[in-house]
Image (spheres, rainbow, N blue to C red):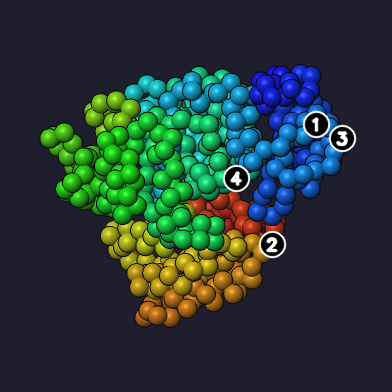
């Protein structure tokens, strides 16, 4: 592709046109003839690596700040917007070639994307998913790996979209994090439907205030043709008020357009009625919990906004299996139950414990920690929630990153001490899991909270293999 096609005709005012072989933002990945974009990150600044990019073959460098190199430099106000716009052009605006649904909110994003996928496949639409667990088309896992946990960076995202087009995807459902919206990762995308799940305390290390956090989430609806919001959530009400008639309001409250009623929770899932358009429809999902009902009606709303009929939607939900790391039961021969769940926020932890308490016949044992280098204000809050709701808690390490794990645990314990809850501190997570397994009684339910689908633990700046399923099986097979 020619430089003028990516940068604009202003390129021709100063330089002759040249063929561009690709785009990169990591100097180590630069190849001959690439455009290198200097990106300012949380830990480093791409401007420092401009000379390295030139040495590796960069033909053009895009930058915000003055740099000293021997190749042409295009200066821009915002490198993140620049790389997003160039990536869209380089890959041929792939997201315009399928239906695009974005899901944002603190909790529920991953599950909702898979529920929507199940519904769309029931409607015979080949569907791709981009998100925390994996990137897939139908049952095929895509090779492009994201360097970010929820929403890929703009360049990787457009590459994934291009793979979706190559794979004949008719719809793509993706998780859209607040970071992605704030950092312009989805700049240049137009969503057919945007979905908002809820807003609870998280990521304040980045957004600083809950108002900023909500405003970041709300940006999705500025780039969506239609929307679905959980209207029982205050954040959902705010987004609905800002965006007017294009929003479908879902929830349990009477003023919702699509309303869940008569909810019944069991270990086998959730059954409820949905009121929509003056009719009542019975719905079943295999994932238990009131929060799962909210996930289901958000997915239903997205499908309705795409014009899918209610019978197909209900069949699609009923056929949706569980999602890795979300109320995931670990198969064992024990007389107690082990559940892995990604709950890593106060609301998420409260949801999973409350759900398990609805069907547990024995004690509920909650094992959890909090991530390092992240919002530390939620740590005592989560300790208090676990102390109030669990029969027994084990405070342990999560992904401590560069923080001292014992200090993280101490902050969690501050909240635990406000309750009468029984607990034990075991900082080493593998040892904590072993203790839980060794001390569980018949009919107890052990919740391993926080890691979910992750198969690693981040200690310092290194990732170590740590799959809780493997940890459980190895310990049980010792006996």
Along the polypeptide, which appears first: circle 4 or circle 2?
4
Report the front residue among 291 and 62.
62
Along the polypeptide, which appears first: circle 3 or circle 2?
3
Classify residue 392 as left or right of residue 354. Answer: right
Along the polypeptide, which appears first: circle 4 or circle 3?
3
Along the polypeptide, which appears first: circle 2 or circle 1?
1
Q: Residue furthest front?
A: 13
Would you place residue 313 above or below residue 64 in this image? above
Residue at x 63% of width, y 29% of height = 86
SS state under label 3:
loop
Q: Which residue lies furthest to the left in this view?
A: 278
Say whether residue 69 is visible.
Answer: yes
Q: How crowded is mark 4: few (under 14 residues within 10 Å), some or many (20 or more)?
A: few
Question: Is there CB contact under 8 Å for labels 4 and 3?
Answer: no
Report the front residue among 307 and 441.
307
Residue 72 is labelled as 1
Q: Circle 3 sits on which residue?
A: 70
Q: Circle 4 sits on which residue?
A: 148
Residue at x 28% of width, y 31% of height = 304
Q: Circle 2 sits on which residue?
A: 460
Please state which of the two labelled residues, at mark 4 or mark 2, is closer to the viewer: 4
SS state under label 4:
loop
Report the front residue among 189 and 75.
75
Question: Whole-percent x and y of residue 52?
Answer: 84, 41
């Amino acid at each position: 592709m020619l430089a003028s096609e990516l940068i604009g005709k202003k390129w021709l005012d100063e330089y002759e046109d040249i063929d561009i072989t690709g785009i990169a933002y990591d100097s180590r990945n630069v190849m001959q003839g690439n455009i290198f974009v200097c990106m300012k990150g949380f830990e480093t600044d791409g401007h420092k690596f401009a000379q390295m990019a030139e040495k590796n073959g960069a033909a053009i460098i895009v930058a915000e700040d003055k740099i000293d190199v021997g190749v042409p430099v295009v200066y821009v106000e915002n490198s993140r917007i620049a790389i997003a716009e160039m990536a869209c052009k380089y890959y041929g605006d792939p997201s315009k070639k399928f239906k695009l649904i974005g899901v944002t909110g603190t909790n529920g994003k991953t599950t909702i994307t898979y529920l929507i996928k199940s519904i769309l496949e029931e409607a015979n639409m080949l569907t791709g998913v981009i998100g925390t667990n994996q990137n897939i088309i139908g049952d095929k896992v895509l090779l492009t790996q994201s360097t970010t946990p929820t929403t890929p960076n703009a360049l990787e995202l457009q590459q994934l979209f291009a793979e979706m087009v190559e794979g004949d995807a008719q719809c793509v459902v993706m998780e859209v994090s607040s970071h992605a919206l704030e950092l312009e990762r989805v700049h240049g995308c137009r969503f057919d439907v945007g979905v908002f799940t809820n807003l609870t305390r998280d990521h304040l290390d980045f957004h600083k205030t809950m108002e900023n956090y909500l405003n970041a989430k709300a940006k999705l609806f500025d780039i969506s043709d239609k929307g679905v919001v959980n209207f029982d959530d205050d954040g959902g009400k705010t987004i609905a008020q800002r965006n007017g008639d294009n929003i479908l309001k879902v929830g349990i409250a009477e003023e919702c357009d699509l309303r869940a009623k008569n909810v019944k929770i069991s270990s086998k899932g959730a059954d409820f009625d949905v009121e929509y358009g003056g009719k009542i429809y019975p719905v079943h999902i295999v994932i238990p919990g009131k929060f799962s009902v909210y996930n289901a009606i958000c997915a239903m709303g997205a499908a309705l906004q795409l014009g899918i009929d209610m019978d197909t939607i209900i069949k699609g939900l009923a056929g949706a299996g569980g999602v890795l790391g979300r109320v995931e039961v670990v198969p064992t021969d024990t007389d107690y139950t082990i559940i892995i769940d990604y709950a890593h926020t106060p609301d998420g932890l409260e949801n999973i414990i409350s759900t398990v308490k609805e069907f547990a016949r024995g004690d509920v044992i909650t094992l959890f920690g909090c991530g390092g280098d992240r919002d530390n204000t939620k740590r005592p809050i989560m300790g208090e929630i676990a102390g109030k709701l669990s029969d027994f808690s084990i405070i342990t390490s999560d992904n401590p990153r560069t923080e001292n794990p014992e200090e993280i645990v101490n902050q969690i314990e501050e909240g635990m001490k406000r309750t009468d809850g029984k607990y034990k501190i075991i900082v080493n997570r593998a040892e904590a899991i072993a203790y839980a397994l060794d001390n569980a009684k018949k009919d107890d339910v052990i919740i391993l909270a926080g890691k979910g689908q992750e198969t690693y633990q981040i200690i310092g700046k290194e990732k170590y293999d740590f799959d809780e399923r493997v940890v459980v099986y190895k310990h049980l097979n010792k006996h």
